[in-house]
Image: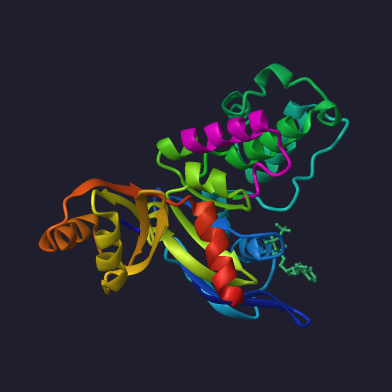
């Protein structure tokens, strides 16, 4: 799979604040890549650097394998990074017409992007009359003008109600299914878990974990096991080098496995000690639990 964006050691300080501190990551073609982090962790600064509006102090990035960000690349990327500036007293259509002219996009494309974002019926409304969710969708519509192959979205669902969040999620999923590559920043972990194929977790300007969301989820999974001889099993597991920790929940034992240890290994271990497991189940941690744990670990 080819790489759309490659970031190496990108760094930006503001005085003594390390907004972004040597981050590196790669966005594979066709992925929905989430930059996940709490407020102030450096997401907006990172996106602003790769969009060319903030100059990094050090580090490099490559779009489409090119060293320099060119006007041609600009046409291939649709971005919603800083709050979009629309004219409050112009209609949605008029606002998009101005943007289409700036981008060199045919006016016919306006209908397409307004339909994708379900704003076509409101095309003659003035911008200031829109709800927050509609304003956010119009920002995405603007990013979609010209049908770019990459979308860069900073907190696209920020401050929206559950319905508004679901609308944005739907648009992102639709665009991803068309083969677009999407890089989005978010502090809503549940959203990243639902929408993203890959994620990097940012904390205080540093990436503390990254990779396919499936892998981020599986690392450190816990396993739920039961047997008739609970105490004997507990002792075996407690002494096993394959197990990080084991605790009791009534007649159930909950284990955290060392990396690369599978549930089958645990089954075999029990069997070799003459214990038959009556239950063996993986318990997936949400990315949110993992995120909180990772942030806590970093503090320690
Ligand atoms: P949020 O979700 O709250 O927008 P973020 O993860 O996008 O946060 P950034 O906006 O990139 O984080 O900010 C990272 C750090 O850099 C913060 O401590 C912020 O105060 C600081 N910062 C960002 N922009 C500037 C600036 N122009 N001048 C000074 N400090 C800045």
For the C terminus, the image quarter is: bottom right
Report if residue 155 lies within the magenta region. Answer: yes
**Ligand 1 quadrant?**
bottom right
Identify whether 179 is placed above or below 76: above
> Can you tell which quarter of the image residue 169 is in?
top right
Q: Residue at x 52, y 44 (%)?
A: 148
**Rendering coords of residue 264 (x, y %):** 19, 56
Q: Position of residue 187 (x, y in %)?
A: 63, 53
Residue pushed farthest top? Answer: 121
Q: Which residues are magenta?
A: 154-174
Q: Is residue 155 visible?
A: yes
Q: Residue at x 16, y 51 (%)?
A: 276
Q: Nearer the viewer, residue 295 or 184?
A: 295
Residue pushed farthest right? 89
Visible residue check, residue 6: no
Above or below: residue 285 compared with residue 240 = above
The relative height of residue 32 versus residue 125 in the rendered view (above or below) is below
Q: Is residue 135 left or right of residue 52?
A: right
Residue appearing at x 23%, y 48% in the figure: 228
């Amino acid at each position: 799979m080819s790489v759309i964006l490659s970031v190496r050691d990108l760094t930006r300080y503001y005085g003594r604040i390390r907004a972004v501190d040597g981050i590196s990551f790669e966005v594979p073609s066709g992925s929905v890549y989430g930059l996940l982090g709490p407020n102030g962790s450096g997401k907006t600064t990172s996106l602003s650097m790769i969009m060319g509006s903030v100059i990094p102090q050090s580090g490099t990035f490559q779009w489409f394998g090119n060293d320099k960000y060119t006007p041609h690349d600009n046409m291939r990327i649709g971005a919603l990074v800083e709050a979009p500036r629309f004219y409050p007293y112009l209609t949605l259509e008029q606002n998009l017409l101005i943007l289409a002219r700036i981008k060199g996009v045919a006016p016919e494309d306006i209908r397409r992007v307004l339909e994708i974002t379900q704003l076509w019926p409101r095309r003659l409304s003035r911008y200031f009359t829109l709800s927050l969710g509609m304003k956010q969708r119009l920002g995405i519509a603007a990013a979609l003008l010209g049908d770019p192959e990459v979308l860069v979205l900073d907190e696209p669902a920020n401050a929206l109600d559950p319905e508004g969040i679901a609308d944005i999620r739907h648009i992102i999923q639709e665009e991803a299914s068309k083969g677009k590559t999407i890089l989005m920043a978010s502090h809503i972990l549940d959203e990243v878990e639902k929408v993203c194929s890959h994620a990097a977790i940012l904390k205080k300007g540093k990436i503390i974990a990254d990779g396919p969301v499936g892998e981020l989820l599986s690392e450190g999974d816990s396993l739920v096991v039961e047997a008739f001889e609970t105490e004997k099993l507990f002792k075996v597991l407690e002494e096993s080098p394959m197990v990080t920790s084991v605790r009791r929940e009534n007649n159930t034992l909950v284990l955290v496995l060392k990396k690369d240890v599978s549930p089958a290994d645990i089954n075999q271990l029990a069997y070799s000690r003459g214990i038959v497991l009556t239950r063996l189940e993986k318990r997936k941690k949400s990315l949110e639990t993992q995120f909180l744990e990772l942030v806590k670990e970093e503090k320690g």
